[in-house]
Image (spheres, grey):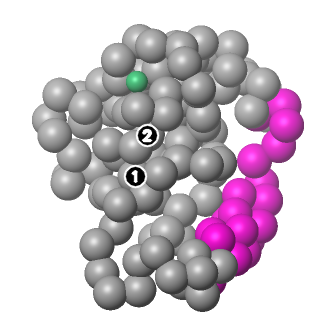
Amino acid sequence: MSGKSSITHGMTGTTEYNNYRTAKRRDAKKTYDAGFSFAMRREMNVMFPNCVVCGGSEHMAIDHILPLSHGHGLSLSNAIRLCASCNGKKKDKYLYQLPKDILDKILSASGEFSDVLETQPS
Ligand SMILES: [Zn+2]
């Protein structure tokens, strides 16, 4: 994870703040993403070979649909794959804060994924 961040407030850019932010995100991942297994990650990679927003395939990452920073961990219904560029646009935004074109693509992709999951044994 080395996405460039451009959050605007007074603390941005200080080493102290960056360390804090990194540690906070790491803790959040440990807490909230714990149920997301390697098998689930692999499943995501198969389901979404390309970025669900732009269709690109550069620097792909699994992204939280609802943001981790608000306590939403990765799960099969809260994960999509985005390229670094689209991930940078989405960042920690809630869905209603996203431009409609991006929102529609994320929702239709995640809906497809949920439907597929319901047909699988748990
Ligand atoms: Zn993209």
Label 2 within 8 A of ligand 1 by Cβ: yes
Q: Is residue 109 left or right of residue 60?
A: left
**1 and 2 marks in contact (CB < 8 Å):** yes
Residue 15 picture quarter: bottom right
Mark number displayed over residue 91: 1
The answer to whether residue 28 is visible is: no
Q: Is residue 58 above or below residue 82?
A: above
Residue 106 picture quarter: top left
Bounds of the magenta span? 20-40
Mark 2: amino acid: Asn
Quarter for ligand 1? top left
Find numbered disc 1 in the image and state the secondary structure of the residue it sits on: loop
Q: Is residue 44 above or below residue 54?
A: below
Residue 51 at x, y percent in the picture: 47, 20
Q: Nearer the viewer, residue 64 or 85?
A: 85
Q: Nearer the viewer, residue 87 or 52?
A: 87
Mark 1: amino acid: Lys
Marks 1/2: CA–CA distance: 6 Å
Q: Is residue 22 magenta?
A: yes
Find numbered disc 2 in the image and state the secondary structure of the residue it sits on: helix
Which residue is rendered at x = 54% and y = 18% of the image? 58
Q: Nearer the viewer, residue 7 or 66?
A: 7
Q: Nearer the viewer, residue 7 or 113?
A: 7
Which residue is rendered at x = 82% and y = 43% of the image? 37
Report the residue marked by disc 2: 87
Q: Is residue 56 above or below residue 63?
A: above
Residue 29 at x, y percent in the picture: 70, 63
